[in-house]
Structures are given as C-alpha cells and as structure tokens.
Amino acid sequence: MTSYCRDGFTFVPIINAELITTDLHKAAEALKQNNIIALPTETVYGLAGNAFEPEAIEKIFSLKKRPFYNPLIVHIKSAEYMTHIAKDIPEIAFRVAMEFWPGPLTLVLNKKSIVPDIITAGKDTVAVRMPNHPVTLELLNSLDFPLAAPSANPFGSISPTTAAHVARYFGEDLEVVLDGGECLKGIESTIIGFEGEQAVLYRLGSISAEDLEHVVGKLKHHTSDDSAPAAPGMLSRHYAPSTETFLTQDVNEMVLSHPDKKIGLLLFQENSISQNVAHTEVLSKEGDLNEAARNLYAAMHRLDHLNLDIIIAEKLPEEELGKSINDRLKRAVKK
Ligand code: TXA
Ligand code: MG
C-alpha cells in the first residue's frame, strides 16, 4: 500500500513508508556504511555523507547530478573542530564563528589534507559550517567524522525545507530522510571567505550582510561569472521552478500583460490582486523578511506543482534578508 505524507496542501506518495524517520541510530549506521542520508538544518535540508570518505562524496554528486566543479560544505559539530580540517585560520574567522555558530554562516578557509579533493573540487579551500539544528547536532556529536552536505535538491532546482520536499525528489534513492520539521530559516547559509583579515562575501543567505558587517566591518563583494563561479549557488540559473517565472516590482501590470495565462503569484505582503490569477502565495502578511525567507521555498514548491503557465514573483525591498530573497528569485527567473 502506498503511504502519503503531507506537504502543505498536497500529499506526496512515499514509496518507502519508513523513509522519513527520527531514528538517529539508523541515520548514523547508514553514514558509517558510506551511504547518503537526508538531514534537516536550520536553513534547508541537506544530502549528507562522511566528509572523509570519497566513496560517500561521489554518491552525493551522482544523486544530485551535481557537476564535480561545485564544491560541498563540510558540517562540523563545534567551532573547535574547524582546526581539524582547516589551517591558517585568520583571527577574524574565529571571531565570526563565535558570534554566529551554530548558525547559517559558512566560512571558506584553507583546507588541511585530511579533506578529500572531491569535496573541494580540487580547490585548496574548504567551506565549513556548524549548523543550528538539534537533530543534526546530536547526529554530528554521535559520529567521529564531519558531514559533507549540499542542499537536498537535484542540481539547479528549488531547495527543500521539509522532509516531504526531499522525499518527493529522492524518495526512491534514499533509505533515510531524518525529519526535523520545517527549516526555521528557509534559505541557505551566507558564505564568506577571507583575504587576510578582510571578509569577502561569496553568497547572500540567511544572515544579512548588514548583520555580518556589525561584526566583520565592511564586506568585500566577490564578483564572478558563470564560467568561473566563486560559489555555484552564484550560477545565474539556480533555485528554479520548472514553471516559467517572472520577477517584477509591478505585479499588477505583469498580470495584465498575460491575459490568457494560468497565473500563480508569489507576493511579499498583502494580496490585492485576484482577477485572472489561479493561485496566490503570500510570504509574510506582516511584511517580516525573516518570515518571508522561511516561507519562500515551500511557496515555490507549491506553486510549481499547480500546473500553472507562469509564476509572477514580487520583488522584495532591497534590504536585510530582502536582498538574499531577491538573489534567489533572480536566479529562479533567468533562462
Ligand atoms: O545552508 C546551507 O549552506 C545548506 C545546508 C544544507 O547547510 N547547504 C548548501 O549547500 O547550500 P550547497 O552545496 O547547495 O551550496 C554550497 C555552496 C555552493 O555554492 C558551493 O560552490 C559553495 O558553497 N562552496 C563550497 N565550497 C567552496 C569553496 N571552497 N569556495 C567557494 N565556495 C564554496
Ligand atoms: Mg544548493
């Protein structure tokens, strides 16, 4: 008999009824066998494997259909553990880790040789973070290795913020999806690197640039293009629904210019448009950017499963987490 799990207002068929679990022992055993599991973090769900075992890491790349030039983030159990996998760590990196860990901040540091090259795509730097989710912290504390984990979505598609999203993507390929509820932050970690004691922003994320700058001073912005992305989350098309998506400041006008389409709206605050619209998602009625970030991917998943002709997304204010959300929406739109 097929089981179903709830995903917003839709139900997802689960091929393996025991797939979604809270059994940490089962998760740890799978990881020790070099198998891949899905786990919750405060940002998005990850596809995790033993960071010290190239065989496990290869499985992550093949499951995600991720090109090998895209390095992975290593998830660690404590700030002190940073020194096991990274060297020449600048003083500012310790300071920022003390301030934001456990939490949605990833640090790019010089790697030690214990980190397999496949994780770092041959780079001499490694991305590291201590996630802030009780389930995953407990799991990390039960293991004697750190976990490499990219977001648990096929390369380029919408990131997952519930166990059901992961089951929908990878239900047939995984044996364990650790359930930690809905991700409280909802968009990926902010990534920074260092040039000496100068912090360099690689990817906008769940910690706003403004909050970081209170601790590290003025951030330098890393510039890159698609031929040499600093971080592939920076590829111009990423986080993308399969439904054609538009981003605009003037939703009304965009709706009027698509009279014959079945339209879904992704709005920041109140919904004032209902004519000619099949479905509307509002990210935060109160206009709270944290709430909007938390709801973003789940709303995109729902819209993408409604057989719409197009999705029209409203641009958020270019401040604090609004910048990070706009960054994701821009990449969702680009062809
Ligand atoms: O919130 C998150 O960061 C989630 C959760 C699961 O922790 N993970 C995540 O992983 O977003 P992923 O693989 O989807 O994105 C990791 C980003 C990629 O854009 C990758 O290029 C960048 O981190 N990255 C990894 N190692 C790097 C390095 N050595 N230098 C620059 N960027 C790096
Ligand atoms: Mg990702």
Image: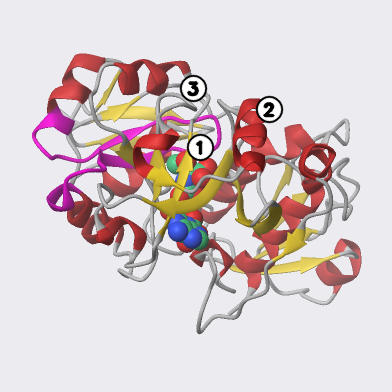
Q: Which mark lies nearer to you, 1 or 2?
A: 2
Pointer 2: what residue? 99
The reply to whether the magenta stretch includes residue 190 is no
Which quarter of the picture shows residue 291?
top right
Q: Residue furthest bottom?
A: 227
Which quarter of the picture shows residue 276?
bottom right
Residue 163: percent from the left, percent from the top?
39, 32
Q: Secondary structure at mark 2?
A: helix
On-image quarter of the C terminus:
bottom right
Residue 26: percent from the left, percent from the top?
17, 20
- In space, the residues marked 1 and 2 are separated at their CA atoms by 25 Å
The amino acid pointed to by label 2 is: Glu
Q: Residue at x 60, y 32 (%)?
A: 97
Out of 314 and 224, give the one closest to the viewer: 224
Out of 190 and 241, give the one closest to the viewer: 190
Which circle marks residue 133 in the picture?
3
Pointer 1: what residue? 161
Magenta stretch: give its range: 30-56
Is residue 286 among the parts visible in the rendering? yes
Say few, some or many: other residues with alpha carbon within 10 Å of mark 1 (under 14 / 14 to 19 / 20 or more): many
Q: Residue at x 27, y 60 (%)?
A: 117
